Image (tube, rainbow, N blue to C red):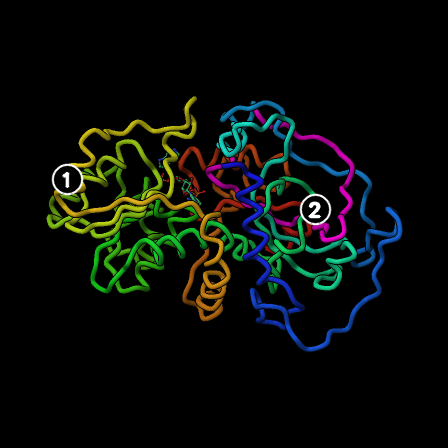
Amino acid sequence: MSTSLLFSNIRVSLACGWGRGVKHALFRPPAVRPQPRRSVIDMSYSSHFMDFKGSSIPSAMKKLLVTKLSQKFRDAVSLQTVPVPTPGDGDLLIRNRFIGINASDINYSAGRYDTSVKPPFDVGFEGIGEVVGVGLSASAHFTVGDTVAYFVEGAFAEYSVIPAKKGVRVPAIKPEFLAMLLSGATAHIALKKLGELTEGQTVLVTAAAGGTGQFAVQFAKAAGCHVIGLCSSDTKAGFLKTIGCDRPINYRKEDLPEVLRQEYPRGVDVIYESVGGDVFDLAVNSLAVKGRLIIIGFISGYQSDLGLAPVKAAALPVKLLKKSASMRGFFLPHYLSDYGEALASMLSMYTRGKLVCEIDRGDAAPGGRFVGLESVFRAVDHMYSGGNLGKVVVALGPEAESKL
Ligand SMILES: NC(=O)c1ccc[n+]([C@@H]2O[C@H](COP(=O)([O-])OP(=O)(O)OC[C@H]3O[C@@H](n4cnc5c(N)ncnc54)[C@H](OP(=O)(O)O)[C@@H]3O)[C@@H](O)[C@H]2O)c1
């Protein structure tokens, strides 16, 4: 499936982010009450842009571009200076303040999302920042200064043009809102639609202390389940306990198959699986009768040439049949009709203090905090070293940094 098709779906469901928001009106449909409108400026290139807080928009900016197809991010991507883009009629120009790193950034740079794609092309799935320019149609819904998060390709840039329909209004430029957008929504919708969670069931989350895993742990716990979380360090295991994980397993210290055999002899009801390879094989073997394995990803294979983690699939039909178990894939862009509800639910949990959105800004990474597009490379390395705790984000510019 082509990327453009995937992302054209988003346009429809993110329309819920439209409308001038009151303080907590994030993700609500357009407000019906009349709104004060600013005059639309769409006469020429120079007058198209609006100043934000008196600062002028430069004519050039930095952005990351895929110049060669490769899953080796540093080989595939280069930092370039290009003109700041002009928003079209239905578009917004966003000054990015935080951008989100995703495991699939290297699948994207390898051209695995759209095998017909030819470099150069933009990269980066998500960003949050303020609106600094609006097209004519877009000005009916957004104005300069609005704070917006988005899930649109091309986020690894100082400024991004996005279709206004894909903009999600957020109350503040906080990386926590960025974490909900893709990582949180994946966990929320996948568990709701495919997990069929009921109280008292056992849920195993792999890469549990990562961007999406941390949300899966919390949503499973909120559903009254017993939650097991896999991770690679005691620091991560400690974090998992703080977010309600009943049994964190540091697989570097404990014998994972043995722990599962000893402590969960009946098997596990639901598995949120994003690692692949041996972990996937173990997950299949650990399913309970009528268990559900949700395939979220297979990160252990992404750095390989094929992008696949080898699995022992030959015995799969018999293993599933013997347990009346099932396995289903989940890919967020296919579930965008559930997106608005998921975001609203997460925001509600977050504002009530019921949802932790752990952010990894790179403080513990070699080279320190991730600031500026140059540090996207380090941020990707950090994630692939397994060093991240929570959602990896990169701040763009000192202003974003000072807001942390
Ligand atoms: N289907 C979808 O729509 C969707 C959406 C978002 C994400 N995902 C998938 O969810 C998974 C996690 O993505 P994320 O962006 O949230 O990343 P993340 O969990 O923040 O970071 C990746 C984590 O994976 C773990 N890991 C285990 N084996 C690894 C290996 N061989 N190499 C590197 N890391 C390994 C590491 O945690 P430990 O060291 O603690 O094991 C690492 O911290 C990926 O598979 C991704 O493709 C899927």
Q: What quarter of the picture does the C terminus occupy?
A: bottom right
Q: Secondary structure at mark 1?
A: helix
**Relative to 337, does residue 152 appear above or below in the rendering?**
above
Residue position for label 1: 258
Closer to the chain start, of discs 1 and 2, is: 2
**Relative to 380, does residue 291 appear above or below in the rendering?**
below
Residue position for label 2: 161
Q: Nearer the viewer, mark 1 or mark 2?
A: 2
Q: Amino acid at mark 1?
A: Glu
Residue at (74% x, 62% y) in the render: 143
Residue 248 visible at all:
no
Q: Amino acid at mark 2?
A: Val
Q: Whole-Å distance between the Cαs marked 1 and 2?
A: 51 Å
Q: Judge left or right: residue 20 versus residue 116.
A: right
Outermost residue, bottom direction?
A: 33
The residue stretch that appears in magenta: 76-105
Total marks placed:
2
